[in-house]
Amino acid sequence: MHKVPLIFDHKLFKAKYKHSQPTVVRLQNLLTETLQQRLHFFSRKFLSQVHHDFSGGRAAKNLIEINPETLPFKHHSLDLVISSGPLMCTNDIPGVLKQWYAGLKPGGVFMASFFGEDTLMELKNCFLKVEEALKLPHYLRFFPTVATKDAGMLLQRAGFHLPTADRTRCVFQVKNLDELLNILKAMGGNILHHRSATLTKEFLKAVEAQYIEHYSSEGQLNVTVDIVCMTGWAIERYAEERLQQDTPKNIGFL
């Protein structure tokens, strides 16, 4: 049996983010607002909803503590699931997506957002250049990301129908490297199971010099954040049964 690799330390995550830092709140709002914009295109009403974010899950008006890997919902009990963020800190993404699909009612909708592969690409490039210049090994300092093209495939693999995935790019500025490193920590860089080596003052000074030279404007550092949004539907159960039974043997033409 395949064992899921443990990339994220959820105990550490809970301890550090139980009381959200301002940076975490800012990033969480960015993920949530992106999904809410897409939700406005739906004309139907969703009676039973769950909003799963870094603080837990909100079912109706109640806050529910949710294990990121094991969901507590009954099968076919939800009309709408909004997941803004937690998938990017999930060890077993395919397994969790299958659980969300099982929890949806016939015709239910699953929507998720998370940070994509080019998020913090400027900082990643600076780290790589400095590591090469100082002849250091390339440590795992950034959280793993899912490519936009793979997001739809993950939904399809979990059983969702009409899977779609798209990317929204946001570019903003921060004052200095310290503020940028706080963003990296808020995105999960400090809850990785396998910790990287401690950053030295020499290393950070070299990274900041690289950043200012290549990715700064008007005295501030430019930051790229990619938000990947994906949507999938739970097919009507009667339609699913019909698809399994309706296998025509002969196809003719009039």
Image (cartoon, rainbow, N blue to C red):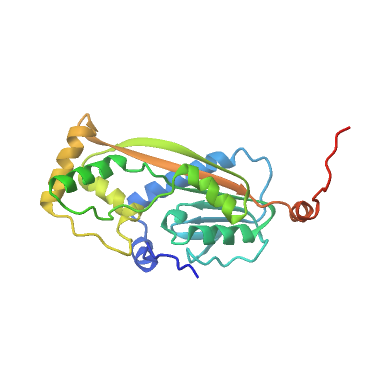
State left or right for residue 69 relative to residue 183. Answer: right
Q: Quick check: can you spot residue 60?
A: no
Depth check: give the residue in front, 139 or 253. Answer: 253
Provide residue 136's location: percent of width, then percent of height.
16, 53
The residue depicted at 27 percent of the width and 62 percent of the height is 195
In the rendered image, the residue lying farthest to the bottom is 1
Q: Quadrant of residue 101?
A: bottom right
Depth check: give the residue in front, 14 or 204. Answer: 204
Q: Quick check: can you spot residue 92?
A: yes
Q: Quadrant of residue 18?
A: bottom left
Is residue 187 positioned above or below 165 on the image?
below
Provide residue 25's location: percent of width, then percent of height.
39, 51
State left or right for residue 159 relative to residue 205. Answer: right
Depth check: give the residue in front, 171 or 194. Answer: 194
Is residue 205 positioned above or below 5 on the image?
above
The residue depicted at 36 percent of the width and 60 percent of the height is 17
Provide residue 150's location: percent of width, then percent of height.
49, 46
The residue depicted at 33 percent of the width and 61 percent of the height is 192
